[in-house]
Structure formats: C-alpha cells, structure tokens
Amino acid sequence: MQSVELDLQHAFFPQRFITPGHLQRLAPRLEWARQQVLQDPNRWTPEQPEFDPLFFPWPEQALQEHRRQEGSGVLGQVFQVAQRLRQEVQTVVVLGIGGSYMGAWALLQACRGPFYNLLPPSRRQGPRVFFDGFNVDGQYTASLLEVLSGESDPWGLIVISKSGTTLETAVALRVYLEALQNHARKSGDLKHHLVVITGPQGPLGQLAQRWQAPRLEVPPGIGGRFSVLTPVGLLPAAVLGLNVVALLEGAAAMNRRFMQEPVGRNPVLDYAGVCHLWEQRQGVHIRVMASWTNALEGLGMWYDQLLAESLGKEEQGATPLTAVNTRDLHSRGQQHQQGRRDKLITNLVLTQPPGKLLRVPAWTEDLDGLNYLAGRSYADIMAAAVQGTNQAYAQDLRPTINLRLPELNEFTLGQVFQMLMLSTVVEGKLLGINPYGQPGVQQYKQNMVRILRQAGSGQV
C-alpha cells in the first residue's frame, strides 16, 4: 500500500531566512521531542487527567488484540455493535462534540461523499449517518428531528462522551432519547436502537445499564481529540461499512515511519519542524489547511480542533484555519496571496482522484471559449490550479507544504490522522507546553453551568 508524502519544495525561502539547513540544525531538538513522545506512554498513570498520550501505541495494540483473539476484544465489539445497527436501522444519529464526532464526520465526508445520505438504501453501504450534540442550536436539532419523525423505518442513536457530562451532548441526548422512546414503542425495544461510548465512570454508563444498551469504552489515557482511531471514530466508521482495520494499519504504518525515519524523510518530524521554524523565526502563526477536494474539508476541521486545543496555551500556539480550493481562492486566496505574511499553507492534495473521471465536453460552437479544455478532466484542471497557486505563492515568498495522499481510502486516512496527531504533540514538546488537556475549554463550561444554575434559581 502507498504512503502519504510531504512535499517541501515551496516550504523554504532563503530570502525569508528559512532553509533546509535550518531544519537539519533543528534535528537534535526534533530527535529529543521524538524520544519524549516515545517515552510518554510509559509515564502515564490513571491519576493524570491532563496527560493522555496513549493514542500513540493504540493502533498496534488494537490490531494485535484483534489478531490474537480472532475477532474478540475492542474491535470485535465494534464489529458486533456496528453489524447489529446495520441490520436493524436505516438511519443513525451520532451525538458528540469536538473529538467525539469530528473524526467520524471527516471519515463520512472523505470515504462516502457529501451526498451519501441522499442515496437510496440500495445504493448505500449502510445506514444514513447524521451528527448532532455538538452545539446548542435548537433549530438544527428540530430540523433533524423533523426528518426522523417522518421515518417509517427504525433509527438508532450513538452517544459519545468520555465524561458523560458535556452539556451540549447531554442536552441533545435528553431530546433525542425522548424521540427515540416514542419511536421505539412502534418499532421495538430501545436497547436495540441506543449505543453508548463513554469513559469507565460517569452517567452515560449508568444510562446504558438502565436501558440494557451496548456500551463501548473510550480507552484510558486517550483524550477526545486523539480518539478518532478508537471506538469513538471506529464505530461510526464501521456503521458506514468502512474498513476500520485498514484505518488502524495506516496509523501503525505512520508510527513506524515516525519511530524509524530521520529528519528529512520523516513526515511527522519534518512537518512539526517546518511549522515550528516558520512560527518561531518569522512569526507565521496562522496555519491554513487547504483541501483541494471537498471530501477533505472535514479532515481540516478535525485538525483545527486538534491544533487549537493542543497548542493554544500559555499565550502560544498557531491559529488553525480550514480552506477548500479552488472555492476559497475566490475569497481567502486574496488574503493568502497579498495579505499579512503570517500564514503557512498546507495543501491536502489527492494524487489519484476518486470516483468517476468527469471530462469537459466539446461544443460545436465555442461560445464560452473553453474548447481548449475539451476532453480534459476535472482532475487535470485541479492539478493545474494546485501547480499555478503554488507557483504564485512561491513567487511572492509565501510558504506552502504539500501533503500528498496517493489515494483517498481508509489506509491513507489512517496515516494522515496519526501523522497530524503525532506532529502536534512533537510541536508541543518543542514549545515546552503540555499538548494534552484543554484547561481553557473547562473554564467556559464552568461559567456556562454557573449562569444556567443561577438563572434557574432566580438569581439572574
């Protein structure tokens, strides 16, 4: 199977004092950071809620358990629950916020496409999958419930929260459970429609026990934004009929490259190093993840959360943005080309576009002057746009990195997920901050709950 690759051709400019030599001189610190990441799992204890590094060895552990136990263990549970949902329901709603849903949402977009839920059952690979519980937007929830109320077929609910107390998800759960209970009276026992994914303790575990619903566990030592390759992301992926073993194998392949390859050939260390150099030496503190396909916009949004929550601490850390090209070349592209020199752009580029290869038809009358493109594919036009944009940025000394995916499938996505998680942790080590935990997020949660409690007691 092919590997994702970094192209750093336009990531260095001697005129702006960032060269390949600087990356090589950073190599000793990158090697130190790599050793820190390798040792972190051995330092972990259950008493450290703000230190959760076990995402790194997880892919190999899950695969080994699966092969050793011949289908039992964590992956066996995932397959069993997913198969039951696939057999019993036509629609699944996933409730979660942040890392509890964004990885699965990215996988749906990338591997099933933006219009998957509109396909008839005979042309889908599994149930429709919708997402909620990531915002307290009553109009959005009411609209989705209206869709579900018209369903004659049964629908299912997957609720994901490690603590079980996240307010946005917990509120949505109450609303959807009420609707699901009403629906289940017509279509069967509630336990066949509800699945819980949570930590070892908390109210969701009690709920699963109350309704005799399947419960999968978020592995200890893995934080929410690092959990895409655990049951948090794997169960929705399996419901969609995706190859979750290939996802884990891709992540394991990236782990091997991270552990074995030197700076200059190591995508994790090279990416972290180039990002760190531009931020520290040139003040380039905005990271644009530019997807050259609509299918990877969700991956960019997932990375936004990963980078922001991991490194946005102690008045440090880059600000992430997601763009989709060529769409955003007609809006943000102006700012990227001629605005402040504070942006590093990472292009997500597909070497082999998926799906049907659409071509430009020829017209007898060349009214729009585009017959010079007749017979050319959309992929040809996109490749020219990537090349032309990179050239324009390079001419103006605007740094770009190409992250090339040879194919859009589970194996390559597993590599990208693991690469970005590892590079983010490496960069945190270089900055001297803890890349795990999110104390700032906890502050807003505490304030929100306090305000709501005061309002309920008449104090506001």
Image (cartoon, grey):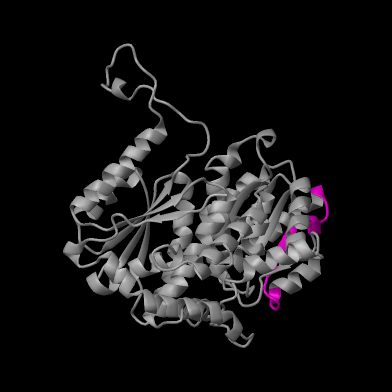
Q: Is residue 70 above or below residue 222?
A: above
In the displayed structure, 201 sits above or below 253; it is below
Residue at 59%, 66% (x, y): give it. Answer: 169
Q: Is residue 360 above or below residue 32?
A: above
Residue lying at the far top in this picture: please name it. Answer: 364
Please determine whether, in this image, residue 263 is positioned above or below residue 290. Answer: below
Position in image of residue 31 (x %, y %): 43, 77
Query: Could one spot residue 437 in this view of the protein?
Result: no
Q: Magenta part of the protein: which range?
A: 187-203
Q: On the rendered structure, is 196 left or right of 261?
A: right
Q: Image quadrant of residue 16?
A: bottom left
Q: Tell me which residue sits at (49%, 79%) in the image.
A: 35
Residue closer to the observer: 35 or 104: 35
Q: Which residue is rendered at x = 62% and y = 58% of the image?
A: 249
Instruction: Name the quadrant containing residue 282.
Output: bottom left
Residue shown at 64% from the left, 60% from the top: 175
Residue 199 at x, y percent in the picture: 67, 74
What x and y, as percent, mark residue 329? Answer: 29, 46
Looking at the image, residue 1 sits to the left or right of residue 157; the answer is: left
Residue 212 picture quarter: bottom right
- Can residue 99 be seen here? The reply is yes
Pick the residue in front: 266 or 176. 266
| Closest to the observer, 419 or 172 | 419
In this figure, what is the number of numbered marks?
0
Q: Nearer the viewer, residue 305 or 117?
A: 305
The percent position of residue 77, horizontal first and vertical second, equals 77, 61
Does 79 appear in magenta?
Answer: no
